[in-house]
C-alpha cells in the first residue's frame, strides 16, 4: 500500500480549504483542465489528512464510475435531442412562433419563455448561440436596448441548465441522492424544476432586464453568428414541441402511474409495468431520441448520412463534460472516505441550518471558488446528501433544486460562461459583471427563496 505523503495529519476542514484553494489556482491561474485539477486536489486532500494514497485512488475511481453510471447515457441522449432540434430548425420554429404570438409588448417575456424551452434539452452555450441572432435581430427591429432582451434569454437558459434534467449538474445530484436513498421521484423532480424555474426566469429575466437595459444598455453585436443552417422544410410548431416535451411527458406519466394506477383490487395494473418502464429516465430519453430521429428526419428530409453526422458530431463535446462530472463524483467519494464530508455535516448541524439552506450555501461557495456550476453541484451533493437523507421530513427533490440554485451563484472571471456572455454580447468586463453576474446571482438567491417557500407549502 502506498504511504501517505503527510507527516502531520491536518484538520479535515483545513485540508478541504487547502484542496479547494489549490483547485482554484490550478484551474484559474494554471489553466489546467478541470478533470485533471479535480484528481490532483482529491489526492492532495487524502495525503494531507494522512490517508493512504492507494486508497484515495480507489475512492476516486469508485466515485467516478458510480456518478457516470447514472449520468452519462441520459446526458448523451439529451445532447442528441438538442442537436437534432437545432439542425432541423425546430428550436427556431418554437422561438419564432412564441414571439409572434405574444406580440411586441410581450417580447421580453416571450424571449424568456422560449429560452427556457430551448434550454431544456440544450447546453447553455448551444442555446445561447442558437438564440443570439434572433435576439439581436429583434433588438435592431424594435429599437429596444440589447440587454433588455438578452437578459431574459440568459435567464431562461440559466434556469433550464441549473434546475432541469437532463443537465449534468442536476443529474449528478440526482445520482447521489439515488445512491444514498432510493426515495426520490424523477418525475416529481422535473415537475418541481419547471414550477420553480418558470417564475424564477420571469422574475430575474424580463423584470430584471427592463431595469438593467437602462443601466447597461449594451449594443447589438457587430457580427452575430448565424444559427445552424436549417433544411428547407422545417418541422411544424406542434412536432417540434412534441419532440421537446416527450421525455417530460413520459416521466410525468410514470410518476402518475406510481401514485394512481400501480395497484388494483386484482393486483398490479396490467399497464403499470409498461408505463413505469417507459418513464424510467434512461428509457424515456431513448424513446424520445428515437422519436426525434425518425420524426425530424422524415419531416425535414434528412438522409441517414446527415442524421448520423448530426449525432456523431454532438457527442464529441459531451466527453469533456462527462469527465468533469465524473471527476466531481470522484472528488466527492474521496471527501466521504476520508471523513471530510462527515466533518462538514457536523459543522453545519452546529449552525442549525436546514439541509436545503446548507446545500445551497455549500454549492454557492464551491461555484464562487471553482467556477464550474457542474463541478460545484457534483461536489456539494457528495458532501450534503449523505447526511441530509437521514433528516426527518426532508424533501429530496427540493434539496437537489436548492443545490441547483446554489450552482448559479456569482459567475465571474473564473467561469467559462462569463466569457461567452462577454465576448458574444460585446461587453466590457465591468459591464458583464454589472449585467450577467448580477443577474445570475439574483437568480441563485431568488431561487433559494422560492425553494424554501415551496418546501413550506408542501409540508
Image: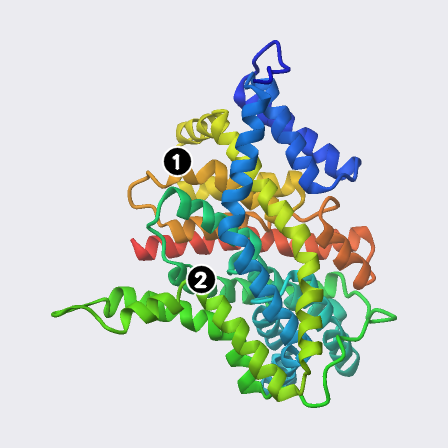
Question: Relative to residue 344, is residue 391 depicted above or below?
Answer: below
SS class, disc 1: helix
Task: Give the residue pinned by disc 1.
Answer: 387
Distance from the alpha carbon under mark 2 to that under mark 1: 25 Å
Task: Give the residue pinned by disc 2.
Answer: 281
- Report whether residue 219 is seen: yes
Q: Is residue 95 left or right of residue 73?
A: right
Tally of numbered discs = 2
- Say which residue appears at 53% left-offset and 22% top-offset: 12
Determine crowd level at label 1: few under 14, some 14-19, many 20+ residues with C-alpha closer than 10 A: some
Q: Position of residue 237 (x, y in %)?
A: 57, 86
Q: Position of residue 78 (x, y in %)?
A: 57, 65
Determine crowd level at label 2: few under 14, some 14-19, many 20+ residues with C-alpha closer than 10 A: many
Q: Is residue 260 left or right of residue 388?
A: left
Q: Position of residue 421 (x, y in %)?
A: 75, 59
User: CB of mark 2 within 8 Å of CB of mark 1?
Assistant: no
Question: Relative to residue 43, is residue 122 depicted above or below?
Answer: below
Q: Which mark is residue 326?
A: none
Amino acid at each position: 500500500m502506498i504511504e501517505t505523503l503527510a507527516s502531520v495529519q491536518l484538520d479535515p476542514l483545513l485540508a478541504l480549504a487547502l484542496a479547494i484553494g489549490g483547485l482554484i489556482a490550478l484551474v484559474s491561474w494554471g489553466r489546467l483542465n478541470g478533470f485533471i485539477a479535480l484528481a490532483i486536489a482529491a489526492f492532495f486532500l487524502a495525503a494531507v489528512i494522512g490517508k493512504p494514497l492507494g486508497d484515495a485512488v480507489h475512492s476516486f475511481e469508485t466515485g467516478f464510475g458510480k456518478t457516470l453510471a447514472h449520468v452519462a447515457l441520459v446526458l448523451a441522449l439529451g445532447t442528441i435531442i438538442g442537436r437534432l432540434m437545432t439542425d432541423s430548425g425546430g428550436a427556431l420554429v418554437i422561438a419564432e412562433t412564441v414571439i409572434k404570438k405574444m406580440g411586441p409588448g410581450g417580447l421580453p417575456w416571450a424571449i424568456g419563455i422560449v429560452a427556457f424551452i430551448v434550454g431544456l434539452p440544450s447546453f447553455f452555450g448551444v442555446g445561447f448561440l442558437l438564440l443570439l441572432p434572433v435576439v439581436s435581430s429583434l433588438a435592431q427591429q424594435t429599437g429596444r436596448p440589447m440587454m433588455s432582451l438578452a437578459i431574459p434569454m440568459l435567464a431562461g437558459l440559466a434556469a433550464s441548465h441549473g434546475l432541469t434534467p437532463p443537465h449534468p449538474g442536476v443529474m449528478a445530484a440526482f445520482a447521489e441522492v439515488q445512491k444514498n436513498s432510493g426515495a426520490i421521484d424523477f418525475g416529481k423532480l422535473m415537475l418541481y424544476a419547471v414550477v420553480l424555474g418558470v417564475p424564477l426566469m420571469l422574475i430575474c429575466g424580463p423584470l430584471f432586464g427592463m431595469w438593467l437595459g437602462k443601466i447597461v444598455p449594451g449594443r447589438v453585436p457587430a457580427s452575430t453568428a448565424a444559427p445552424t443552417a436549417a433544411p428547407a422544410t422545417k418541422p411544424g410548431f406542434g412536432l417540434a414541441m412534441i419532440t421537446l416535451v416527450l421525455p417530460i411527458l413520459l416521466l410525468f406519466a410514470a410518476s402518475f402511474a406510481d401514485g394512481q394506477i400501480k395497484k388494483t383490487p386484482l393486483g398490479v395494473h396490467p399497464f403499470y409495468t409498461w408505463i413505469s418502464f417507459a418513464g424510467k429516465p434512461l428509457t424515456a430519453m431513448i424513446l424520445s431520441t428515437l422519436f426525434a430521429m425518425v420524426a425530424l428526419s422524415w419531416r425535414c428530409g434528412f438522409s441517414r448520412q446527415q442524421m448520423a453526422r448530426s449525432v456523431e458530431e454532438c457527442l464529441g463535446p459531451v466527453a469533456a463534460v462527462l469527465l468533469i462530472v465524473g471527476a466531481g463524483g470522484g472528488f466527492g467519494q474521496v471527501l466521504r472516505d476520508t471523513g471530510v464530508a462527515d466533518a462538514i455535516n457536523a459543522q453545519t448541524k452546529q449552525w442549525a441550518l436546514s439541509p436545503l439552506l446548507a446545500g445551497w450555501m455549500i454549492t454557492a461557495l464551491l461555484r464562487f471558488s471553482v467556477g464550474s456550476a457542474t463541478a460545484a453541484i457534483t461536489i456539494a451533493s457528495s458532501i450534503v446528501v449523505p447526511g441530509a437523507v437521514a433528516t426527518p421530513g426532508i424533501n429530496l427533490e427540493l434539496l437537489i433544486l436548492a443545490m441547483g440554485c446554489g450552482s448559479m451563484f456569482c459567475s465571474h472571471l473564473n467561469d467559462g460562461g462569463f466569457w461567452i456572455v462577454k465576448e458574444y454580447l460585446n461587453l466590457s468586463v465591468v459591464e458583464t459583471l454589472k449585467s450577467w453576474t448580477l443577474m445570475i446571482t439574483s437568480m441563485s438567491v431568488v431561487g433559494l427563496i422560492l425553494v424554501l417557500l415551496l418546501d413550506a407549502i408542501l409540508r
